[in-house]
Amino acid sequence: MKAILLEDDLILSKEVINFLNSMDIECDAVFDGELFFRQQKLNAYDIYLLDINVPKFNGLDVCKKIRETDKNTPILMLTAYRDIQDKMDAFNMGADDYLVKPFHFDELYVRILALLRRSAHPQETNDIIVIKDLEINTIDLKVKRNGVTIDLTPKEYQLLLILAKANGRTLSKHAIAEQIWDVHFDSNLNTIEVYINFLRKKIDKEHPDKLIHTRPGFGYYLSAEK
C-alpha cells in the first residue's frame, strides 16, 4: 500500500511517515498543495492524507481537484479544524473521512485500513432497488428520483444503499458507521448526521414526500410511508 501525505508540520509529517512505514504502508510527504500535484504525477497512490491549512493550494482545494479526475481513491482529511461546518466542507469536496488533530496513530491506521478495504471491495449487487419514485441501480451505481438522476458521492451512495437494504428498519448511527467506515470510534457518529443531511438535500428537498426519516433516540430509516 502506498500513501501520500500533505502536511506542512514537518515534525508531525516525519512521525506519520515513520509510523506508517512500520505498519507496511509506504508514505511520501509534501508540505504544500503545489508540490502535492507534482508528486502525484510521479506515482500511483492508494490513499490521500490531506491537511487543510497548508501553503499554495490548501487541502480542500487539493481534495476538490483530485475528485475532478479520480472519484474512487480514498481521501482522509487530517486537520486541527473540528467545527461541523469544516467537516461538511470537506465532505462536500469529496473527502471520505475526517480525523481531527491531535489523533492517536492507531486510530489513523485503522481508518486508513477501513478506507482501503472499502475501495478494494466495491458494492457487489445485481439488482435495482425501487422505493416509491426513488430508483437505486446497484449495477451502474446510479440513483434517480422521479426519473431525474441524482449525483451522489461514494459515501452518500453507500449510506443510501444500506438504508434502502434495511427495508424500512431503523439503523442506529453505530450500525451505519460500522458498515460504511468499519470502525467503532464515536467521532464518526456526527459524521453520520452530516451525511444524512447531505442525502436529505439531494433526495428529499425538492419533493413533498420525504423518504429519509429519523427515529429520535434510535437512528434513521428509508421509507415511502409518511
Image (cartoon, grey):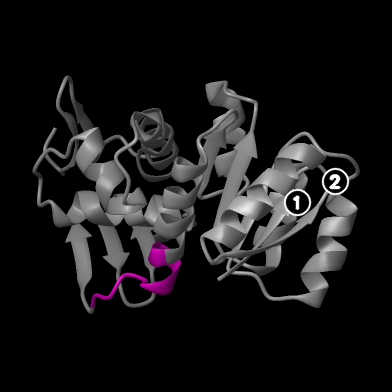
Q: Which residue matches tag 1?
A: 62
Q: Rate crowding at label 2 as few (under 14), some (14 to 19) or many (20 or more) other CA atoms within 10 Å.
A: some
Above or below — where is 33 with respect to 208?
Answer: below
User: In the image, what residue occupies the spot 31% across and 70% down?
Assistant: 123
Of the residues shown, which amino acid type is indicated by label 2? Answer: Phe
Q: With 200 as the anchor, is 217 left or right in this view?
A: left
Q: Position of residue 62 (x, y in %)?
A: 75, 51
Q: Is 121 inside the magenta-drawn segment?
A: yes
User: In the image, what residue occupies the spot 37% across and 61% down?
Assistant: 143
Q: Position of residue 207 (x, y in %)?
A: 34, 39
Q: Quadrant of residue 73?
A: bottom right
Label 1 residue SS:
helix
Above or below — where is 144 with respect to 107?
Answer: below
Label 2 residue SS:
loop
Mark 2 and mark 1: Cα distance apart in space: 6 Å
User: In the image, what residue occupies the spot 63% across and 46% down?
Assistant: 93
Q: Quadrant of residue 45?
A: bottom right
Q: Position of residue 76 (x, y in %)?
A: 57, 49
Quadrant position of the C terminus in the picture: top left
> Which region shows up in magenta?
117-125
Whichever of labels 2 and 1 marks the residue nearer the N terminus, that label is: 2
Q: With 133 as the anchor, is 122 left or right in this view?
A: right
Between 206 and 61, which is closer to the camera in this rendering? 61
Tell me if I can see residue 13 in this picture: yes
Of the residues shown, which amino acid type is indicated by label 1? Answer: Val
Q: Which residue matches tag 2?
A: 57
